[in-house]
Amino acid sequence: MSDESLNPAVPEAAGSTNFIYNFIREDIAEGGQYEGLRVHTRFPPEPNGYLHIGHCKALCIDFGMAEKFGGLCNLRMDDTNPAKEDTEYVDAIQQDIHWLGFDWGDRFYYGSDYFPQDYEYAVELIKKGLAYVCELSPEEFKANRGDTQTPATSPYRDRPIEENLRLFEKMKNGEVPEGKMTLRAKIDLASGNFNMRDPVIYRIRFINHHRQGTKWCIFPMYDFAHPIQDALEGITHSLCSLEYEDHRPLYDWVVSNVSIPYHKPRQIEFARLGIDHTVMSKRKLRKLVEEGYVSGWDDPRMPTLCGLRRRGYTPASIRNFCENIGVGKSSNIIEYAELERCLRDDLNQTAERTMAVVHPVKLTVTNYPEGQSEVFAVENNPLDPEAGTHDITFSRHLWIEEEDFLETPIPKYKRLYPGNEVRLKGAYLVTCTGCVKDEEGNVTEVLCEYDPASRGGNPADGRKVKGATIHWVDADNCADAEVRLYDNLFSDAQPDGPDKDFLTCLNPESLTVLTNCKVEKRMTEIAAAYDKTENKTGINAPAFQFMRVGFFCLDNKDSTPDHLVFNRTVSLKDGFKK
């Protein structure tokens, strides 16, 4: 599987570089250990859950480094632990990686496809006297493991090679009860690195594998299988998170002691991505899903890529976020606000502008003729002239935001109140003349008069208007919509912290559903067109800036032309409480 194609010219260090980039550059330069080899990386997710924002850093590093050096990146499902693996996750992982803009070509592999080779290399180690069958339970071995000064012990370490081969064969044939025996590498029981104290490299599991079925009842451990798989695929650089730094000596030991006919990969570690107000553990995310704290893996409050996509996050915003935070050796927690900033930057350039009112109150223009209507053109995106315009209608009856009227104004309030003049965005100047209330004193209708000579919002007499510009929707030509406002899933900045039950940190106000919102009528046509697209959940739904409100997208699961549902992707301004 190794691709021995020569590298293109070693790129000059320019723009954003880091220690991984510099290591790879040195390795493939003249005199480097991989001179003449093409840079080859891999992304090896375990298919036991959906990818989340924490995986994106590794994704961008693995695929990004291959891109920067004109190399290759494999996608390999690390399915050597069959307990919670499933084809559902395999399909979702591929979809998410493609959504982010990365591709592996025809280099898609399963770790379980290497089981025959893994087994043969284990036999080779036994024959070399470098592995033995051990009958100590994990608890017994741990008790005999010693401390940093005291060597560990195992009464089975000196079994004859032939006996080890016979017992390992029995393990493979299903003749040994689960947990009765393991195969251990014979390395160094006195090592200060506990990963080198005769680690288990094979264990028995009588379980149905999602791909191999019941063909195998012995399974290689990750620390044994992974370096072999990397070497068989011709990987030059095995890039992984920092918790594997202490495992690197074992990685190197494995590839140095089996007769793989390719070069030895180099493992390089980097710090994992941590973000406040969220959890990254698949186990904890699965608990949220299975116990109904969220609606599913794609709940827009989840840090999963399918959840972020459903909320309206864009591939560009996530990749820019990963690029901005950089690559380091020290773990740190990034503020969620930084991810939101990257999202705003992208959506501000690409999202179509539209009028929408999420807390509606009726506005009646009392001197505008009943039954009359006119059309105004609205820019789809003022930052992109080529985005064009769309038409909206104006009539006597409008909807405005409830917060845009106060019967008794507070200091510095510049919106509608009796006697104050404001601009209706893109339409006319209006002056508030009063309001109508129900029996309980709630405002049900705001009254105003418009200046016919101010079409477009510019008065004919050139007077200066100190009032604000407010948005609106034509009540005679609009559509009803459900709007879902999302906040952080956790109210605690570090719900994953020590001595914390993350479930007690859930934010009870992480979702607010508004059911009486008003949007432009054309949204039903946009929703109908989107409804006909294939794989709605695998692509981004149409994104909009609800002017003065925030960025929103059609919900890719629940929205229909007859029942519009919009998710708030992010507010217009950073409302995050530091």
Image (cartoon, rainbow, N blue to C red):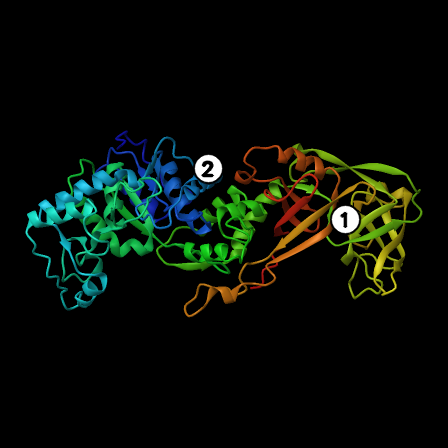
Q: Which mark is residue 158?
A: none
Classify residue 478 by image quadrant.
Answer: top right
Left or right side of 517 for 270: left
3D distance between C-alphas at marks 1 and 2 = 38 Å
Residue sitting at 21 percent across and 47 percent down?
Answer: 174
- Residue 316, image x, y percentages: 51, 42
Q: Residue furthest top?
A: 5
Classify residue 467 by image quadrant.
Answer: bottom right
The amino acid on which the numbered mark 2 sits, given as a three-letter code, is His
Which element carries disc 1, helix, strand or loop? loop
Question: Which quadrant of the rendered structure holds the C terminus?
Answer: bottom right
Above or below, 124 relative to 409: above
- Is residue 33 visible to us here? no
Q: Which mark is residue 98?
A: 2
Q: Nearer the viewer, residue 361 or 164?
A: 164
- Is residue 476 visible to us here? yes
The amino acid on which the numbered mark 1 sits, given as a three-letter code, is His
- The residue where tag 1 is placed is 471
Q: Nearer the viewer, residue 23 or 354?
A: 354
Residue sitting at 62 percent across and 44 percent down?
Answer: 558
How many numbered discs, if any? 2
Question: Which quadrant of the rendered structure holds the N terminus?
Answer: top left
Label 1 vs label 2, nearer the camera: 2
Label 2 crowding class (10 Å Cα cut-off): few <14, some 14-19, many 20+?
Answer: some
